[in-house]
Image: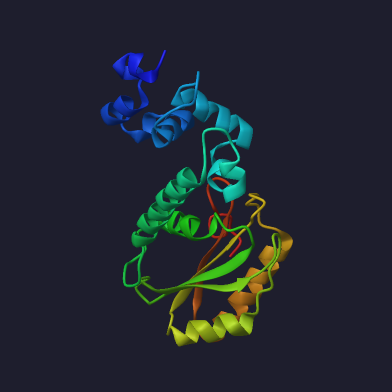
Amino acid sequence: MGISDWPAAERPREKLLAKGAAKLSDAELLAIFLRTGVSGRTAVDLARDLLAGFGGLRPLLEASTQEFAGHHGLGPAKYAQLQAVLEMARRHLQACLEPGESLAGPEDTRRYLTSRLRHLPHEVFACLFLDNRHQMVGFEELFRGTIDSTSVYPREVVRRALDYNAAAVIFAHNHPSGVTEPSRADELMTQRLIEALGIIDIRVVDHFIVGEGRPVSFAERGLL
């Protein structure tokens, strides 16, 4: 039996229109993207198979072209469509916090940093530069490393903060492993940066670690 034969309330597309996208499961959302199934399998069946095969939604969304297109029911065209959807989502989130806009709160900052850093396969140290009203004047990926480490140089951070005439900064780096717990090295690095920037009266507002789930805030952990 095809999805068109299901009760309207159970069809993913109709369910989304009636109740909103947040009410759908990962498989139902993916089924809407896939649109059709394969012989003997509905789009929802295929979506469930893919989620099980990849180990969840995030590994599927971050799969390479070869990994994605190698699965039955997928291909380069679907991969291109998926990448376009993901890029639109990233740009939408980034547009929520552009230069000249004030930070509404830590959750807006979390969403913005997640859109910029979570999908990267290597570790990146980035900085949000803020004016004295906490409006963003710039965002930069300052240092880039391997899959699990990067080197951060306080002198370069100070130089870029002065270039932006920043009054405050928010640091962020990603953990490609997905683990968001701060390491002792993360804490020591942050303290060195606080000391270096303190000499020129630039305040460190927070430091976020981006990985799986909700980014961890050093300020909320009392680590600043």
Residue at 43%, 35% (x, y): give it.
34
Give the number of callouts.
0
- Left or right of 40 in this view: 102: left
Task: Residue 123: give x, y in percent of width and height.
Answer: 64, 63
Name of the residue lying farthest toward the left? 18
Quadrant of the image occupied by residue 3: top left
Q: Which quarter of the rendering shows the C terminus?
A: bottom right
Decide which of 44, 177 is in the foreground and name it. 44
Decide which of 67, 174 is in the foreground and name it. 67
- Left or right of 107 in this view: 177: right
Type of colouring: rainbow
Decide which of 200, 182 is in the foreground and name it. 182
- Left or right of 162 in this view: 143: right
Q: Is residue 160 above or below residue 88?
A: below
Quadrant of the image occupied by residue 11: top left
- Left or right of 81 in this view: 125: right
